[in-house]
């Protein structure tokens, strides 16, 4: 498959559908040389292609995170610049899966904290999840997680409160984030 055809799989009129992005994921996993084309899809003019490229990249990172080892800086730039909620929620998931330098991690956390103010509940939930996953197992990291979850507990969105409860149960049990 020529690389240009990969992005045509992501085009389509229905915003409520992922179109053929699962096929794009399978093709990139089978032929990793197509990955740069998928990454380029994050910045094309068509918002549906951007949304589906972000979804596909998140799924590629889920299966083979090492394939994205060359792209943290680019993904972070897209995450920082995007105002499209469908891209933002996938960027939140993706940032939590990438190997980030200390400076990139700091930039990712700033971006994700900004996402917590989004009008999209999905973006807020994914940002909260990613922030907890990016927290270092240090006293400062544990304090940040406790603060984030306490703020989420006061959210007017039931989905945000539910995610906070889930994260608290999972993180505190697994990593002893409840104590210093």
Image (cartoon, rainbow, N blue to C red):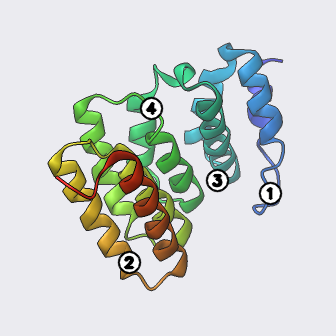
Residue with the mark numbered 3: 47
Which of discs 1 and 3 lies nearer the camera? The answer is: 1
- Residue drawn at 40 percent across, 62 percent down: 168
Q: Quadrant of the N terminus?
A: top right
Structural crowding at the residue carrying mark 1, measured as other residues with C-alpha within 10 Å and reported as few (<14), some (14–19) or many (≥20): few
Using the numbered discs, state the Cα–Cα distance from disc 1 to disc 2 in whole angstroms.
Answer: 31 Å
- Of the numbered discs 2 and 4, the one sitting upstream in the chain is 4
Residue 3 seen anywhere in this rendered image of the structure: no
Q: CA distance from mark 2 to mark 3?
A: 32 Å
On the image, which quarter does residue 28 sit in?
top right
Helix, strand or loop status at disc 2: helix
Residue that carries the numbered disc 4 in the rendered image:
98
| Depicted 23 relative to depicted 45: above or below | above
Judge whether residue 73 can be spotted in this image.
yes
Q: Which label sits in the foreground, 3 or 4?
A: 4
Asked which secondary structure carries label 4, the reply is loop
- Mark identifier at residue 153: 2
Picture mark count: 4
* Location of residue 59 by image quarter: top right
- The image position of residue 41, as x and y in percent, is 62, 36
Q: Which residue is tagged 1? A: 17
> Local crowd at mark 2 within 10 Å, few (<14), some, or many (≥20)?
some
Q: Nearer the viewer, mark 2 or mark 3?
A: 2
Q: Work out how far the residue at label 2 is from the one at label 4, CA to CA, in angstroms.
A: 27 Å
For marks 1 and 3 on the same chain, the one whose residue lies earlier in the sequence: 1
Q: Position of residue 46 (x, y in %)?
A: 66, 49
């Amino acid at each position: 498959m020529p690389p240009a055809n990969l992005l045509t799989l992501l085009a389509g009129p229905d915003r409520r559908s992922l179109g053929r992005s699962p096929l794009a994921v399978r093709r990139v996993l089978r032929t990793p040389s197509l990955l740069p084309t998928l990454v380029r899809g994050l910045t094309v003019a068509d918002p549906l292609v951007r949304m589906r490229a972000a979804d596909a990249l998140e799924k590629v990172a889920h299966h083979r995170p090492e394939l994205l080892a060359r792209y943290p800086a680019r993904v972070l730039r897209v995450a920082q610049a995007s105002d499209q909620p469908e891209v933002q929620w996938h960027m939140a998931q993706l940032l939590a899966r990438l190997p980030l330098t200390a400076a990139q991690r700091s930039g990712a956390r700033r971006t994700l904290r900004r996402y917590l103010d989004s009008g999209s509940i999905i973006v807020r939930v994914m940002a909260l999840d990613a922030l907890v996953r990016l927290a270092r197992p240090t006293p400062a990291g544990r304090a940040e997680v406790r603060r984030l979850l306490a703020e989420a507990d006061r959210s007017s969105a039931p989905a945000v409160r539910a995610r906070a409860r889930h994260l608290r149960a999972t993180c505190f049990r697994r990593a002893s984030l409840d104590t210093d």
